[in-house]
Image (spheres, rainbow, N blue to C red):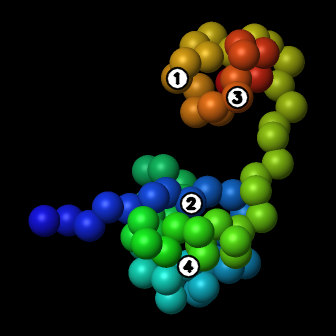
Amino acid sequence: MASATVTIIGNTYPVREGLRALGGRWNANAKGWDVPTANAAAARSLVTPAKPVARKSRCPNPSDCGDPTCNGGCGY
């Protein structure tokens, strides 16, 4: 049985060794670190959130763009 993980994204490169020490593994598909749920809070505290990318168009699919605050205007 696999343990539950949380994917951590953002500016992870500078803290990759810390994420590894917390049991994290790089997930190339998600472009983030899969960290055991028990260590998720500690992992999040290491990472600077990714800056939003300015986009000029409307989001074609707000429910599936990956931004939980998307209201259709993110342009993803």
Within the image, what quadrant is residue 46 found in?
Answer: bottom right
User: Which comes sooner in the sequence, label 1 or label 3?
Assistant: 1
User: Which comes sooner in the sequence, label 1 or label 2?
Assistant: 2
Q: Helix, strand or loop at disc 1?
A: helix
Q: Whole-percent x and y of residue 35?
A: 45, 69
Which amino acid lies under the numbered mark 1 shown in the image of this protein? Asp
> What residue would you read off at disc 3?
69
Which amino acid lies under the numbered mark 3 shown in the image of this protein? Thr
Q: Whole-percent x and y of residue 29?
A: 44, 50
Q: Whole-percent x and y of residue 28?
A: 46, 58
Within the image, what quadrant is residue 65 found in?
Answer: top right
Q: Quadrant of the N terminus?
A: bottom left
> What residue would you read off at disc 2?
8
38, above or below 23, in the image: above
Q: CA distance from mark 1 to mark 3?
A: 11 Å
36, above or below 74, in the image: below
* Residue 19: mark in rendering: 4
Which amino acid lies under the numbered mark 4 shown in the image of this protein? Leu
User: Which comes sooner in the sequence, label 1 or label 4?
Assistant: 4
Q: Whole-percent x and y of residue 32?
A: 54, 59
56, above or below 32, in the image: above
- Asked if the residues shown at circle 4 and circle 2 are in contact, with their CB atoms under 8 angstroms apart, the answer is yes
Q: Nearer the viewer, residue 41 or 29?
A: 41
* Residue 64: mark in rendering: 1
* Residue 42: mark in rendering: none
